[in-house]
Amino acid sequence: MDELVRRATGADIADLTRLEALARDGIVGVRGGDLRLQECSPILDWPTLLDAEGTVVLVGTLDESVVAFMVMTMQPTRGFISHVYVELDARELGLGDTMVEQAIDAVRSVGLDGIESVALPGDRETKNLFERAGMTARKLTVYKSLATPITPDAGTERETS
């Protein structure tokens, strides 16, 4: 089986769209996933993204079939991996590791200080992918939704002055 990681091209747009949909579907209902979906909008304009300065879009292939992708943008001091996904049947073959290595090389080549990404709570596969590349957690972000107002229990009255 031939494995290859390379820069994405316009010919990969259908596969990128398909893989992003799989990635998004895969985090529905996962702890933190729904909020992550709100924060990270679907990519609607792949052609523009592929040509954007400071953006690296990689694909991982098996026997010429695109089965993985990664999107990284160069921030002022670091690279940020916003998307990474490998199809279930293609995991544990090293494509994710190779994409992360290439992303690190891209960040290093422009002289930035570091590289970062996000792994959802309990997403051991993504956490392990980043840790194999020497990336470690540097902060935890916690969140509580306040969208649903808290209502007093029935029969309980509050006094106001």
Image (spheres, rainbow, N blue to C red):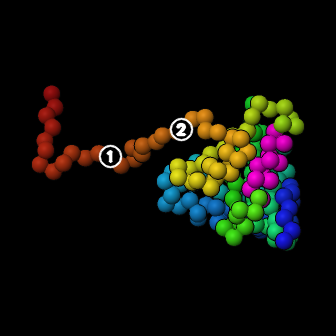
Which residue sits at x=86%, y=62%? 4
Mark 2 or mark 1: which is in front?
A: 2
**Is residue 101 magenta-colored?**
yes
Crowd rating for badge 1 (residues with CA inside 10 Å; few <14, some 14–19, many 20+): few
Q: Nearer the viewer, residue 46 or 68?
A: 68
Q: Quadrant of the C terminus?
A: top left
Q: Is residue 64 above or below residue 138?
A: below
| Identity, as a three-letter code, of the amino acid under mark 2 | Leu
| Identity, as a three-letter code, of the amino acid under mark 1 | Pro
Image quadrant assignment for residue 156: top left
Which residue sits at x=69%, y=59%? 85
Which residue sits at x=80%, y=53%? 98
Q: Image check: 3 left or right of 152?
A: right
Question: What residue did someone put label 1 on?
Answer: 149
- Specify the principal SS of the magenta part: helix
The x and y percentages for residue 30 are 51, 58
Q: Are marks 2 and 1 in contact (CB under 8 Å)?
A: no
On residue 4, which mark appears? none
The x and y percentages for residue 159 are 13, 34
Of labels 2 and 1, earlier in sequence is 2
Q: Quadrant of the N terminus?
A: bottom right
Question: What residue did someone put label 2 on?
Answer: 140
Q: Is residue 115 visible?
A: yes
Give the magenta range: 95-107
Q: Nearer the viewer, residue 17 or 112?
A: 112
